[in-house]
Amino acid sequence: MATDSLSVANQRVVDTLAARLRRRQVVGSRETALETVLVLRQVISKARFSNIDQLVEIIRSVGRKLVEAQPKEHTVGNTVRKVLHHIREEYHTASKGTAVVSTSKDTLSIAKFVLQGQPRKQNVPQKTTLNESHDMLKENDADDPDAFARTLKPVLMEAIQDVLDELETVHDNISKNAKDHIHSDEIILTIGKSSTVEAFLKAAAPYRKYTVIVADTAPSYGGHDMAQSLSSAGISTVLVPDSSIYALMSRINKVMIGAHAILANGGMFAITGSLLVATAARAHSTPVVVCAGQFKLTPQWNLYHEYGALDFADPSSVLGFEEGNLVDKVDVVNPFYDYVRPELIDAFITNDGDHPPSSVYRLIKEAYDDEDYEL
């Protein structure tokens, strides 16, 4: 049914994004999430469905196709889960005819609180006045099969726009309290090029005078771009090789790094070298702070070994073929990401406040529905 409900135009849009993901033409967690939301918005706007189950299956089929195209880019699945969560909330609000959902089965208890975490807020006033015409929300109407979709789509477009707005303003929302986390004369260490960390550090610059030490992150050397960007913003910046991280850690007041994906246990995948930084920081009792948007929260666990990478890059940047005497004698691994365990992280700064790693599971419970953990 989901495949039949997808028009040729929608199928083409999904296939195009899947091909771009497969070829690594869309790079970066935020860019990937934005592209996914735009595709889902177009699919929903043109899809034909007569009940909520058909709509959910259409979105899930699109999500599965995109995830299969690039299974190591977790933000694709996260965005699909977030959209499904918003769609269900809007549907329940429309079908009940009120924004406050209160039934006997929703009664709170200690057991449910322990199992489910903090209850979701369902008494938020809705912007759309679909409640006035909720009687028109009829599923499986034989006389007018498109009535359900025609009535519900305006609210769904607003819900998807909320997700899109959250992604577009994520850096501003994370950085708005930067001056409260960074103090004058501090020495902060970061690694690689993270747009979230970059925005966070720049937001504090007008209020605080501090120094940032940037590790160059070989062999990608993303730290060079980061150091240049921070320096051009008037921030005192020092670029150092990765081998100097442990030696400098005793002088560091705070470590600030980005994340590629935040896992359900509070651990994360981050750029190569992050595990080295976090381990050195733990040895010197230096706090490690991670700046990341909530769209990176992933209801999954580390399926790889403890120090396993999520993905691997071309090893020739580590050991080129011109080193002919060595190439045949060694196996070279060039991981994209490190897995950083939750005990090495002190806090996550997100667009919804600051949270310890132990609270990640609660954030995931609030952001996604349980039935969507597996698309």
Image (tube, rainbow, N blue to C red):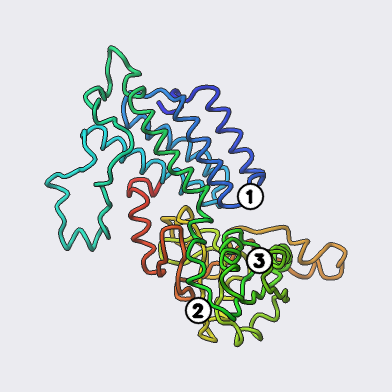
Q: Residues within 10 Å of mark 2 (few under 14, many from 20)?
A: some
> Which residue is nearer to you in this view: 160 or 357?
160
CA gap between label 2 and label 1 equals: 29 Å
Kind of residue at badge 2: Pro
Q: Which of the 4 image quarters holds residue 101?
A: top left
The secondary element bearing badge 1 is classed as loop
Seen in the picture, residue 344 relative to 292 is either above or below; the reply is below
Kind of residue at badge 3: Gly
Q: Residues within 10 Å of mark 3 (few under 14, many from 20)?
A: many
Q: Residues within 10 Å of mark 1 (few under 14, many from 20)?
A: few
| Residue that badge 2 annotates | 287
Q: Which of the 4 image quarters holds residue 231?
A: bottom right
| Residue that badge 1 annotates | 27
Sequence-wise, which precedes: disc 1 or disc 3?
1
Side (left or right) of 302 relative to 159: right
Side (left or right) of 64 relative to 329: left
Q: Residue furthest top?
A: 143
Q: Residue furthest left?
A: 104
Sequence-wise, which precedes: disc 2 or disc 1?
1
The residue sitting at 54% across, 86% down in the picture is 284
| Residue that badge 3 annotates | 192
Sequence-wise, which precedes: disc 3 or disc 2?
3
Can the viewer see residue 220 in this picture?
no
Image coordinates of residue 67 in percent, x first then y, are 52, 44
Image coordinates of residue 371 in percent, x first then y, are 33, 46
